Amino acid sequence: MTHDTGSLHARHRAVMPSWLSLYYAQPLELTHGEGRHVWDAEGNRYLDFFGGILTTMTAHALPEVTKAVGEQAGRILHTSTLYLSRPMVELAERIAALSGIPDARVFFTTSGTEANDAALLLATTHRRSNQVLAMRNSYHGRSFSTVAVTGNQSWSPTSLSPLQTLYVHGGVRSRGPYADLGDAEYVAACVADLEDMLQQTAGGVAALIAEPVQGVGGFTAPPDGLYAAFREVLAREGILWISDEVQTGWGRTGDHFWGWQAHAENGPPDLLTFAKGIGNGMSLGGVVARAEIMNCLSANSISTFGGSPITMAAGLANLNYLLEHDLQGNARRVGGLLIERLRAVAAGLDVVREIRGRGLMIGIELVRPGTDEPSPEAATLVLEAARERGLLVGKGGQGGASLRIAPPLTLTVAEAEQGAELLADALRQTQRQLADASES
């Protein structure tokens, strides 16, 4: 079978929206994968440090997951939530127990966008308010309601909104008006900003939605404990806390199973959303909430595809593998090593402003050498240079000036060291290119 990627690209442009962006000047067609590697249509092999946007969480073609999917497909593919589903109940039981939320109920969706959309519906209905607090530089999805709580200009195509959204400081530690403060002072300033922000509302705000580590925002995070301090203020007003765990959940940060656990002093969130990694590539997301919140909808509701038997089978097999093989521990150990290697490389490079993150969720912010100005150009150059060397990474951050490193959680020490070296070469090449361009 022959593959003409150029022809496929032309066909893509002819039938897909112009805003459906593709990586690389010559886009890749990925045809198969195994473990931490993928292959393109020309037969080139790549070490995958992005996992389909943090979605291939355990490994490509993980036998336990593909076996579960195949066996379920051989029985029945689809039923809908109008019928009892054993795999849906079993996965919901597991997630409810793991969530840390008391008296938890679980509603399954097909994506993180849909999960956040459902969480906003629940919170605003429960609180009878359309006022929502969100974090600056945040991203929560591409639907009409989730765009309305996205504080990142690059991902906000419209100002029209069903919600009144107010944006709070705190998601980006190393930029903004409080960047020069120590951690304790930073948290205090952000809490003061939150309290001041609440004076601008009509009262009765529904919820704060926040990513413990901002994903599309470039893997930025506040000091541990910020959201616990926020929770103290929110609880006084009855305002709900929605923790968007679409990218941080399931142990990716290494130190915690959920991102909210770095902010656990005042208890768990009221609602938790998840997606991406749990299905290892299957379309699986959901919301966990206390029963009183989850059950607040008075109208009928079902989900045609949420909780599909085949995605539930995949999720159960994937979650079992993750827990049995302590992939959270592996993310902590191998991720810690990877961050150390990358920081050692970056120490001599002006193009790198900051390496941040924890576990296997690592961000590299790039700037125009000699300045503090974010450089999307540098990020694009590194993306291409890494690909040339057989390494796939992601982009994000303000204006797309940060690299996102998020390999499958089974990453080995040898693969981490190999990836760090390939990325180091790509960063050095980019610094030389930018230096040559500034001289000419």
Image (cartoon, rainbow, N blue to C red):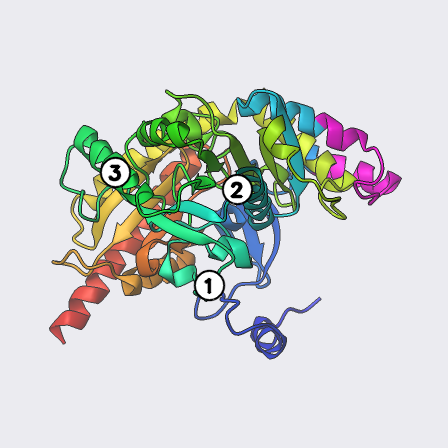
Q: Residue 264 is drawn in which quadrant? A: top left
Which residue: 30% across, 43% down? 199
Farthest residue, direction front: 202
- Decide if residue 298 is on the left or right side of residue 59: right
Point out which mark residue 190 bears. 3
Q: Hey, what amino acid is under mark 2?
A: Arg
> In 3D space, how far apart are the residues under numbered discs 2 and 1 (Cα atoms)?
19 Å
Which residue: 57% across, 48% down? 117
Q: Hey, what amino acid is under mark 1?
A: Tyr
Q: Residue 77 is drawn in which quadrant? A: top right
Within 10 angstroms of label 2, few (less than 14), some, or many (20 or more) residues?
many
The residue under label 2 is 36
The residue under label 1 is 23
Instruction: Work out whether mark 3 precedes mark 2 in sequence or the reverse, and give the earlier one.
Output: 2
Which residue: 72% across, 36% down? 312
The magenta stretch spans which residues? 66-90
Query: Is 67 part of what is drawn in magenta?
Result: yes
